[in-house]
Amino acid sequence: MTFLDAHDITVRRGSKAIVDGVSLHCARGAFVAVIGANGAGKSTLLSVLTGLLKPDEGQVTLDSRPLAAIGARDLARRRAYLPQNPRAEWPISVERLVTLGLLPHLPAFGNLPALFTPRVVRALEAHDLLDRREQPATTLSGGELARAMLARALVGDPDILIADEPTAGLDPRHALDCAVRLRAYALSGKLVIAALHDLTLAARYATHVAALEQGRLAAFGPIETVLTPALIRRVFEVDACVGGEGRNTYVDFASDASRP
Amino acid sequence: MGLLSRAALTTAGAFAALILLFLLSLLTGRVWLPPAQLIHGLAAPKPNLAWLILSELRMPRAVLAGLVGAALGLSGAVLQGLLRNPLAEPGLLGVSGGAALGAVIALYFGLSAHFALALPLMGLIGALGACALTLSFGQGGTLTLILAGSAVSALSGALLALALNLAPSPYAAYEITTWLLGSLADRSWDHVMLAAPFILVGWVLLAMTSRALDALTLGEAQAESLGVNLNRVRLLALVGTALSVGAATSVAGSIGFIGLVAPHLVRPFVGYRPSKLLLPSAVLGAALLLFADIATRIIPTQSEMKLGVLTSLIGTPFFFWLVVRLRRTAP
Amino acid sequence: MIAAGRLLTIGAVLAAMATNVAASAQPRPAGAPAKPMRIMSMNICTDLLVLQLAPKSRIASVSYLAHDAANTVEPGLDKGVAANHGAAEDVLLESPDLILTGSFSPPATQRLARQVGARLVLVDQAENFEQIRAVTRQIGQAVGEPGRAEALIARMDAKLAQLKASAAPPIRVVAWDGGKTVPGKGTLTNAIIEAAGAVNIGATLPDATYGRYDLEELIRDRPAALLQGISSWGGPSLQDDSSANRVVRTLYRGRRITYPEMLYGCGLPQSADAAIVLRDALRRLPKQGWAY
């Protein structure tokens, strides 16, 4: 069983609460889309859920154990994190980049054990990167780099994947591709938590949604029931309609009638 | 797989160059001793002229050049990996300046006349002090660390200038200046014994950052999520630099550019992987410094050609070349 | 307080300048050159000679650097004599009628001398005993004590003759103190070494003044003794560190002769005494027994 719980998380910057008393219960098999306006606290919340940021109040537990009590390496094996706009600092090959995801699994000394190599190859294959395995990561296009980073995150088969805006800056095809992969991963028995700005993608592929409004949790639950025009109006201050269903759901924003 | 053997080949190549230059260094000196005489001196009953010069002067000098060069190269590789900045080198974080200041203080107050360990110890204290300052002011990201290091460098530079200004005699000022220019001339086994332990401990600490440096290729957030303790890595890198480069500066003066150049030359051959960069950078750094040291003895000049001067002269064109290359590859 | 002092100094300088302009306007009596009454020396080597040649009453000041050196030449030699810092204010305040300094003095000194109406005598560095005689005579003439100068020279020559008669065995030495150069053929150190009867290895180097020399050459040449100058500054220097080099420590234990750097820096009649001290030290050297 894998579940990640946030208990009353509060993060303050100065006197302002960026994240204010957020509590979540996420279990495996779920793809949780975290939505909210810019500055609503999505990235901060995800940092706390990852364990990289200590909340001023509250705590995060993984299988009822506080994150702080789990060793960094053990935690690294169980959950992977993709920040916004990930980039490679050196022009290492795509294969090397993906292999970095296995660092928490490496023994104290020595190189990658031979038995891990097939996992790297499988990850490259699964993300359509096999023909680019020797290419320097810095020369990849946006979509390819996103795939490579996702492959890096998933190569170690973590129980939890936390991604911050994984579809940002991607063209429709690659954004769709990414969302499809995330859903597939979640449905294979993992927990995926991703901040998404594209509500249509969220509506189509996520299983749950957590909506943040100025640091507070406006709503949390299965996406079919929770993602309503009323919620969108409240969180984004725009009118929208949610149409279609299943793989054809769409979220349509109404234009502002007062402006041309 | 192919890349792995390329890294190993690069290291092997650097080692071969190192051994060759080491032997060449043993042949170089103001007194020309033909190789036959040197070998004969090794076998003949000691002491004899060739053996004395070889064992007491040239050998410790070559060993020291290797130790210092390797310390500089390794530290440069680690710092470039840590800061993900191709311009990083030990001097950037204030450590070299601190070491120089510590050593100059020891010279200035005559501490080294009273007990031999004073100079390297003061150099180390200076380096560790600078390191502590940089770490404490540089909390909060890479950019802050670099800025803190610049500030600490500026501080030690100012204090060095003060020491020169207040030097008791013009000759003392001249001596401090020439010492700062860097030299391995007339170094003996005493110097090797003094510096080696600290350099070796520094190497161990620096080597321990290897895995973390690889993870940092993905940036700090992802590296942390992979289990890297960033504070621990920074501490290891800086203290390792302080110990090895601090001790090196104490016995050889300020020698720059080796820490900048060596990693750059090696990087393409190891697939740009920071962990694979460490050993070849150390070996190449040692080879480069040996080469420079040999050159100072061969180039015919009126007064002694200083080692630090030569490395600067070779290093600055490299700097320009780096800029040109970055201009071409940058978007 | 400080402002008042400053004003006073400026006032004094202005007054001095005014009186000088007035004084230099008066004609000097023709005939025998008058003995200078206010002698100012601004160079340590000229200081030491002026202190020995001219009576203290006629010396306005010598440079502040001379104090330690003067005591080495003769204790209390500069007692009661004012010290100057070679600055323009000193010249203007003391208004000397004779200024003695080294030949490498800045052009400003010439202008100053003209301004106060003083005679300026530039004295070359004396690098051997012939030049010492010339310089002593020159300063003796300038301060109006030629007799005293001849007396000093006579004493020096007597000592040199004594040295020639009973010189040390021709031991090979080098004045190496761990630095990168050693004094060569054209230096005073060389003259003193040769007067003592020893052989200066530095004289064989191509450079006439200071030649490059390092540890390897030292080991190859195997001089019997090392000469090391002790600076009267007493300040710390890298030389101490380098000359404590392991090799030198073992090979030259008990074979390092020190000398006061000051006395080897200025050519004086006392240089003959220095040569005698050196000769005696060389005689006391243990027999050379090199293992290699």
Image (spheres, rainbow, N blue to C red):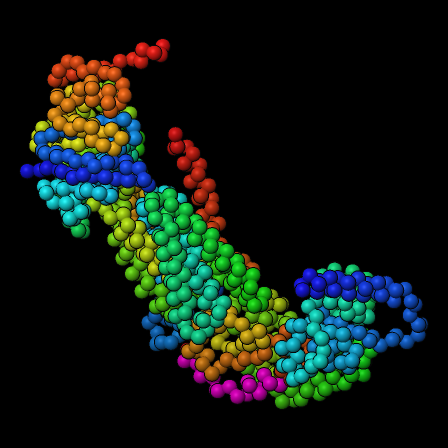
In the rendered structure, the answer to whether residue B311 lies left or right of residue C274 reads: left
Give above or below for C66 relative to A248.
below
Q: Is residue A173 visible?
A: yes
Q: Which residues are magenta?
A: C276-291
The quadrant in which residue C61 appears is bottom right
Question: In the picture shown, does residue C61 fall above or below A60?
Answer: below
Indicate the quadrant containing the N terminus of chain B: top left, top right, bottom left or bottom right: top left
- Direction front: furthest residue: A15
Name the residue rendered at 19%, 42% in the picture.
Answer: A58
Quarter of the picture holding the C terminus of chain B = top left
Measuring from the top left, give residue A186's x and y in whole percent. Answer: 11, 30
Question: What residue is rendered at 16% in x and 36% in y?
Answer: A23
In the image, is residue A200 above or below residue B98?
above
> Residue C289 magenta-drawn?
yes
Q: Position of residue B67 (x, y in %)?
A: 35, 59
- Which residue in the rendered view is the most extreme toward the left? A1
* Residue C256 coordinates in the image, percent (x, y): 50, 80
Which residue is at a point 32% across and 46% down the rendered structure image?
B82
Verify whether residue C287 appears in magenta.
yes
Residue B302 located left or right of residue B223: right
Quadrant of residue A98 within the rendered picture:
top left
Give the image location of residue A57, x and y in percent: 22, 43
Q: Is residue C272 visible?
A: no
